[in-house]
Amino acid sequence: MEEQKLSFVGKSFERKDGLIKAEGRAMYAADREFARMLYAAAVRNPRPRIKILGISDEKAKKVPGYVTLVTYKDIKGQNAWPVLDLDYPFLPEKIARFAGETVALVVAETQRAAKKAASLVEIEYEELPNIQDPLEALKPDAPEIGGTTDMKNVYAHFTIQKGDVDKAFEEAAYKVEGTFKTNYQVHGYLETQGSIAIPETDGGMTIHSTTQCPYYVVDGVAAALGITYNKVKVIQTVTGGGFGGKEEVPALVAAHAAICAAKVGRPVKLIYSRKEDFQCMSKRHPGWAHIEYSADKEGHLTGCRVKYVLDAGAYSTITAIVLFRGTVHSTGPYKIPNIDVKTFGAATSKVPCGAFRGFGQPQINFAQESLIDELAAKIGMDPVEFRLKNLLNPGEMTATGQKLTSSCGLSELVEAVRKKSGWDKKVNLHEKKGHIAKGIGISTCYYGVGLGAKGRFLDRAGAMVNIYKDGSVGVSVGNAEMGQGALTVFAQIASETLNAPMELVKTEEVDSSKVPDSGPTVASRGTLMGGNAIIEAAKPLRERLFKVALDMLIDKGGTSGKMIAHDGVFEMDGITVSFTDVAKEGWNRRLKMCEEGWYVAPHVSFRLDNGQGDAYVVYSYSADIAEVSVDTQTGVTKVDKIWAAYDVGRIVNPMLATGQAQGGILQGMSWSLFENLQYKNGIMVNPNFTDYVCATTKDKPEYDITFIEKLYDEGPYQAKGMGEVPLIGVAPAVANAIKNACGVRIDSVPLLPEKVWRAIKQKNAAKEAK
Amino acid sequence: MKNEEIIHADEDGFFTIALNVNGELGHMIVSRNETLVEALRHYGWKGTKKGCDTGDCGSCTVLFNNKPVLGCMMPAVAAHGGNITTIEGLGTVRNPHPIQQAFVEAGAVQCGFCIPGMILSTKALLDKNPEPSEADIRKALDGNLCRCTGYVTQVQAVRIAAKKVKAMKKQQEKLAAKELAAEKRKAARKTAKKAAKKNK
């Protein structure tokens, strides 16, 4: 594309769907009604791991409005949900592996009747041995409860081997090691999961689903019903938040609705309650990591050993890809010549974990960034100085031996937050007012954009751009709006390429029958992949329209031949024509005004045997500095302010990008301080927002956000990916700030008051003993 | 309307309640354990969202006699005789309420699921306190969970909304004053005419 001044990209356009949502007119899944629609409700496994002996609807039948019971026997296709492996049945036949798993479904005339009847279905069962702790699952004498690899109870394992780690540790001037743990995180999207399945006359099924991955839903429904893909149509409803939670599991919910609808021949709606959503939908994996770093006497990192275990739960789902991302990023954004990383996704008898913003990185980033601070302290270096000495810069090699391109501004990000936060003055201040101690902490992270080597076969995307006779433009894409602003960003990219006014461009929510399988909208890939596909589609239209515009301007008396296209207007020698007029003329000339685009991510070379090669096409970066106040009497931590800087390439819409940044920071802060999902004897204890606490307006910190745009030439208008980096680095920045405030290292997330309080007490006791 | 009247269930256990939703006076047939949000949604007011069922997320916030209530915590029968405002009752499609405009302008809307509740909490706040401080705003929105934003845009939205509502009220007052003045002038002209007639 030729050099041009951007008219639409880089501007804070208001959201296309803003007012519709503010007026309460947006149609989420639960808001949609169809004639003769029935309702489904799930019958759930009451115990951690059971052998199913029988399912009876004797009592349920008596509920007025009861229609039918649906079990594995009603599945006409394959009873195995196609994710990566096939270990998760749509409905279990013999063994249910976690409390809350859908064992059967009830269909009834009303939602209330369905729920009532489902509660009356009786499951006869025998309890089976179960495992709650992922480290127990990896022991040789553990009972076998799952696993999809050659190792017992393991869904995935990866390794990165580089240099000679043993030698590095032998020769090191400084060594540190530590074990760190992080707990679950519940997505807490405000709209719970839900699907409506509508049987079509040709034996097909139309699905309305709240999802960020409509094509996964196609896979699931086609498999469950045993029908071909051209008979499954998935329409994405307005989606009330995703954060990864609507990546893989909506396919399961939709398949359940579809199995019911296929049986009764009527539309069936299945909407989850919040409790059900907690109990059986995906979560952020709890993480366990043991890390060791070594450094030479000047403070250069020389080696890193990592053992990293994710608690994957009862089925594999997409644990392998989550673990892959965690593995690749496990040593931190540093140049380290000698590396030994071993990672495992372990089976337990709990809720299956899956995608969540950050995708296996926040857990390990908390561990390694906490330990980096400990190493800096041991050497006697300032944490910022230590990082600047070791951070990856353009041209340098990552842990997997990937050479970074010029689109890497990590050191600049660190300098930016250092300056803005007043780090140099604050870090040695240790200000204390009464029993409130103030502290400051930093963290850095890098994030491979897109699906990377482990998901490369899915890393393509399509789009269709259609210019109507009146000059309005329809953009169909395969990547989903879930709140992040994709509809608006995609419209901006289409506007920019076509020189069409924003108000004339409409982006459609995904309909799987309109655009070919574009993979999931995850991994911060929406803008990159969908945007590039739109550009591919719009380019030939642009050529045609620009030629028409040129003709029209010459006809109107333009002589110089120098045309400038900007803000929806074409201009030559002071004469102008509008995009609308050009489009109409294009139609008069019977030009092709609709095109499809297809974008395939560049190849990544990565070898699974030694973990070396290019793991992702490009990286986004972040640096976070947190300032906290810790009440040393109660251990309560308050985050006062976060300074964050991001390099995510070109910012397409600053207002939306800032919204993503603030939201990511808050979600990260909420995970690091409050959110604490608990299991007791294999049963989830707090599946609700009363006892599972998320940050509210009152907890809001101050935000200071900086974007440093290191352009990525392969990206749409040189953008990279934005969605996830803001969350990842928050927890370690807060933990490091707590250490700075009151001298205690908390090695597990959430950083609860009782942990801080106990650590302070122990520290004081140790001091007194001396 | 007054809700002092005692209502009884019919023989099937259903109650017929009378209430005013967004200015439409009407009846709803509800069961004993039906919540207000279920009833409203059943009768087509789908802008009211259901997010948690436990009174924690605030997505189902509606105004009951101008006070914010949680639709999932209030039995529908308890709404008998009351005035309810849902998100559909603010502004019109062609002419959105200034609070709705403010939320869009400030970038406070992302997935949008919490927004109807947030906007109604804001409405209740601004009705009571037209110039709220940041602390007032945070307190008023504390019961509305949002998982997309960092809450800062919503605080800004309420600030913008306060200004817009004030401007709207001023405009309305101006208009009202203008009308009043016009009427007065008209009346004065009339009396002057009458006086002129009398004088003749």
Image: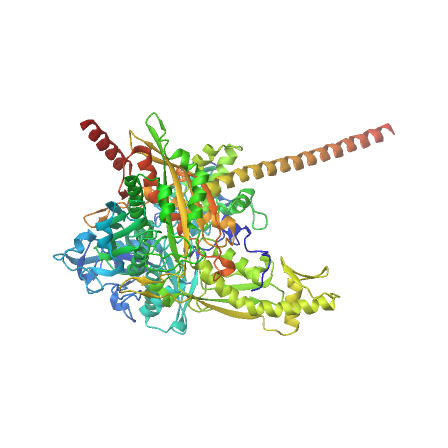
Residue furthest to the top in view is A434
Rendering quarter of residue A547: bottom right
Rendering quarter of residue A230: bottom left
**In the rendered image, the vertical position of residue A364 relative to residue A51, given as above or below:** above
| Residue A245 x/y as whole percent | 35, 55
Residue for point 65% across, 67% down = A584
**In the rendered image, the vertical position of residue B200 relative to residue A414, given as above or below:** above
| Residue A626 x/y as whole percent | 38, 40
Q: Is residue A40 visible?
A: yes
Check the picture and name the quadrant holding the N terminus of chain A: bottom right
* Circle count: 0
Relative to A146, A264 lies left or right: right
| Residue A297 x/y as whole percent | 29, 44
Rendering quarter of residue A455: bottom left
Relative to A491, A255 lies left or right: left
Check the picture and name the quadrant holding the C terminus of chain A: top left
**In the rendered image, the vertical position of residue A327 relative to residue B16, given as above or below:** below
Residue for point 54% across, 37% down = B162
Residue furthest to the right in view is B200
Colour convention: rainbow
Question: Residue A330 versus residue A40: which sits nearer the camera?
Answer: A330
| Residue A602 x/y as whole percent | 42, 66
Q: Is residue B76 visible?
A: no
Question: Residue A741 versus residue A722: which sits nearer the camera?
Answer: A741
Question: Residue A48 versus residue A142: which sits nearer the camera?
Answer: A142
Residue for point 29% across, 51% down = A302
